[in-house]
Amino acid sequence: MRAFSYEKPADPAAAAARAAEVEGAKFLAGGTNLLDLMKLEIETPVHVIDVNGLGLDEITETEEGGLRIGTLVTNTALSADSRIRRDYPLLTRAIAAGATGQLRNKATTGGNLLQRTRCPYFYDTNMPCNKRKPGSGCGALTEGAFSRQLGVIGTSDACIATHPSDMAVAMRALDAVVETVTPAGMTREIPIEEFHLLPGDTPEQETALMPGELITHVRLPAPVGGTQEYHKVRDRASYAFALVSVALVRQSDGSGRVALGGVAPKPWRSDAADKELPNGASAVMSVLLDGARPTEENAFKITLAERTLAAMLKEA
Amino acid sequence: MKFTQPVDSNLFDDAKVVGKPMQRIDGPLKVTGTAPYAYERNDAAPDALYGYPLGAAIGHGRITRMDAEAARSAPGVRAVVTTLEIDPLEKGINNVARLFGGAEVQHYHQAIAVVVADTFEQARAASALIEVDYEEGTPADLDLDAAFERMQGTGEPDTLVGDVEAAFRDAPHVIDQMYHTPAESHTMMEPHASTVDWSDGEDMTVWTSNQMINVNLKSIAATFGIDRERIRVESPYVGGGFGSKLWLRADAVLAALGSRAAGVPVKLALPRPMVMNNTTHRSATVQRIRLAARADGHLTGIWHEAAAYCLPGGRGENPTAQTPIFYAGDTRRVKNHVVDMPLPETADMRAPGEASGLMALEIAMDEMAEALDMDPVQFRIINDTQVDPANPDIPFSDRHFVECLERGAEAFGWSKRNTTPGEQRDGDWLIGHGVAGAYRGALVLPSGARAILDGGKLIIETDMTDIGTGSYTILAQTAAETMGMDVADVEMRLANSAFPASSGSGGQFGAPSSASGVYAACMALRDKIAGNLGIEDASFNGGRVTGGDTDMALSEINEEVSTEDAIQWGDFQKDYAMGTFGAHFVEVGVHAYTGETRVRRMLAVCDAGRIINPITARSQVIGGMVMGVGAALSEDMALDRGRGFFANHDMANYEVAVHADIPEQEVIFLDTLDGVATPLKAKGVGELGLCGVAAAIANGLYNATGIRVRDYPLTMDKFIDRLPAI
Ligand SMILES: Cc1cc2nc3c(=O)[nH]c(=O)nc-3n(C[C@H](O)[C@H](O)[C@H](O)COP(=O)(O)OP(=O)(O)OC[C@H]3O[C@@H](n4cnc5c(N)ncnc54)[C@H](O)[C@@H]3O)c2cc1C
Ligand code: SF4
């Protein structure tokens, strides 16, 4: 870990302003991802701005009948909130499927959205990685490399990493909106759909946030009802990132929404695929995963995604 | 004491302490976090500074330049030692790659520098400032399947009995399949760690985490070219080893070099990513197994040929280890090929050989049972042997494999299982049951101890280690039993090179060997006490010594009495085959849609002679079963075939079983005694629990789904296309 300076700003706007002002600054929330990455020198901030204690830790009701989640609400608190459990059970299920109790106690809402990929080559600073070191090449795309866990769709020749979050997949299915404050002190809203970027030639650019911009809240629209399920598939029963995860909201008329985790650089969903839901898993996936470009090692994810959704549709 | 003939009756026959369940005596220290582990020897080396290693960034090749100037001038840094400043060090016992020194890189993350600093963070940060230029070696062929193809049929068989080809020509039932087991990492909780004081470059004290103190001592002496007398090694608590801490590793070497360079004691733990690629692992294997059987189920041919890899000069894994001896069979051919590959070092991991061998052989047995339309339990029973099949004059010392199978089948409810694959369901889950046999050799090694009677207390000193296995407890029980004393009056002092050399812990030889060594030392102590008191037929009971006119409490003996002895093993044991046996039964659920596979119920029945302590023995067996679940379902060191290193080198990506993977586990110990094996009639059990587990799960998966997976781990990517259509 490199030495860094540390500060606790007075309010969210000051935090954003400082972050834009000091080059190489990073926000610290729960620290469960940032600190790990700093220890390995994958992240090397020279200045750390601690956003804990800025009061962004409440869940309040919105006029449209939804909920507004402060960025510092922990994953534990969010998943346990009675309104979330009642009206957005998908979110509770997705969060509870991730990490461990101890980690969820520390992990925050904004931090979770911004957690970085678990690509093993990203994690090894001896290896080339366009995301960690732009222009160095993609370690996972060379002959004989290990790519079983990586993405099958939305990827590029520069990067095939996945976004590892479970929570974000549910947020995507629920059409959450990210609220921010910019370094100039302006607030901004970013639909979750636009929040995470595809890698293209610039896999190091992962979100729509501008330098220094701080997430303040994540807003959930009014509840969509229906049956809500999250099925996370992994080799061991717990404490592993998803090979594939499926978030499903299903209405009694057979319509609904589907979002996938573990397959793409962002939670993966499309309106066109949602419309196929009454026609079954295969119809959904042939739209949702159209254009997939898996490696030999992770091609099974395509079959797995379809079969996982099929199991859920049968149950729902 | 020389063990020259099988024991008939001895003092363990009516044991009061040995064989009884007893909680481990070091338990409170461990659960309160006060057991001094190697990296936390603040009691012994309070002023130790922090060492941090740097590993090579390439698979193999040479270092052409290192620049450590920035590291040396970084905050808090006291010393930096780079591999180019040091001639290649000599190798210790069973070290294949050198641990430090010189420009050659033999494998990824081989240690190439150590930084010593005032704080851990300073040392780690400085290590990242060292610049290294490499010249990469020519890309190596890392394809084990291709190597097997090339080598198949070549070389002298390791075991050859009868005319195998003819047996296969004539047999009505033949199976012939390929099996794969992946590279595995020991992944013990405590990484390799040492605190070393070599401040003056003269005498060296090594507080380390190691399984075999005497081997470690000799290896350190050889590595640095110094006299053994000048080195002390202590390893009183080891947070797991599974074989990865049998031999000297880079942690101790780097801490020593760092200590000498900085002139202070230095502590160093290998970071987890280096544990995977810097230390040792179990080689992947490719195995071809052919079985031939008569219609009545008798095996007429067993043909097992395999390949594993290692660095030049190393050993690799021998997955055919059990095949010469486990089952009867008229003819047999066994051969293991070891292929040189520039990959991280391969060496012993829990049940080396049998663990990966039985993963394959016990699937093959299931396949043959099916081909014969025979119950797989019955098929194994039919092929039991009471003699070494290759040398029929050599009987097993004590073998109750059949009873393991029968007791297990009964306790598990085997007869109630569904026998047609794919026909039992629980909601979305396909349910199956599997069985596998377990075998692991029962090696014993010489082992010494010192026994001291001092004011009614018995002190036992031996360099035996407790790697979480329960040595403290079972050796105290053995000593108390032999001396007729209370366990509370026994003080155990372990794992210090100042004490008599023991077997160390490994190969499941630790418990039987070291308990016999303690027994020998205590018997010598009894003789000495009796001699001092002039008693002829002394007996030791209830803390008293009696005989003739004497009847006195041991606490009344004022003079300290001390003896040292070691168990030596007589040649008569060579007239027997010695092994431990077991049977594993599992219930497996396979998600019919996703192929997620979870174990729902496990039973092991073990035949390992006298069980010295049922609590610690059970912990060993269930721990082995947990490891078997990982081996079956998730553990897989992912080889980057282009770069020649294991890419998933942390515990997030190398998936051992977690709590949620482990169901109800039951262990039954058969009440057996093996008087050929040891004076206690006990054998080891620490590795038996792992042997066969993975195959039982694979067989359960087959029974659940009708899909045979012969390639571990049994992850859904290997069979999802064959699951029932949706
Ligand atoms: C062992 C382990 C297992 C895990 N398993 C899972 C799993 O199965 N599923 C899963 O989904 N996740 C898993 N996680 C990831 C975990 O969910 C994330 O680490 C966590 O959600 C990150 O939240 P945090 O508050 O700790 O973020 P931090 O580490 O504090 O920050 C993460 C990033 O977000 C930035 N950031 C934080 N807050 C803001 C803000 N308000 N505005 C702008 N930027 C901000 C930080 O600068 C940093 O770049 C696992 C983590 C670990 C360590
Ligand atoms: S897939 Fe992306 S994160 Fe992984 S090595 Fe390639 S560029 Fe880096």
Image (spheres, helix red, strand yellow):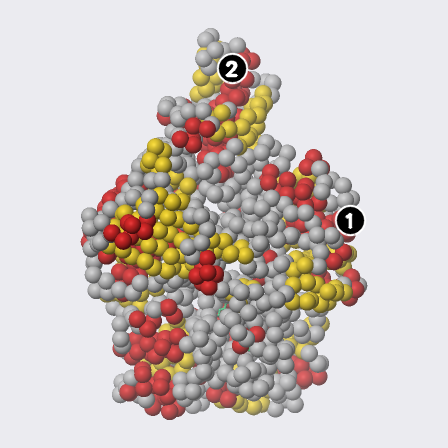
Residue at x 34%, y 90% (from the top left corner): A275
Residue B266 higher or lower than A94, as above or below: above
Q: Is residue A118 visible?
A: no
Q: Label 2: chain? A: B
Q: Residue furthest top?
A: B549
Tag 1 secondary structure: loop
Q: Amino acid at mark 2?
A: Ala
> Where residue A263 sits: x, y (%)?
44, 78
Residue A37, picture quadrant:
bottom right
Quadrant that contains the N terminus of chain A: bottom right
Find disc 1 in the rendering and name its residue: B263
Secondary structure, mark 2, is: helix
> Which is nearer the eye, A185 or B587?
B587
Q: Which mark is residue B530?
A: 2
Q: Are marks 1 and 2 in contact (CB under 8 Å)?
A: no
Disc 1 from disc 2: Cα separation: 51 Å
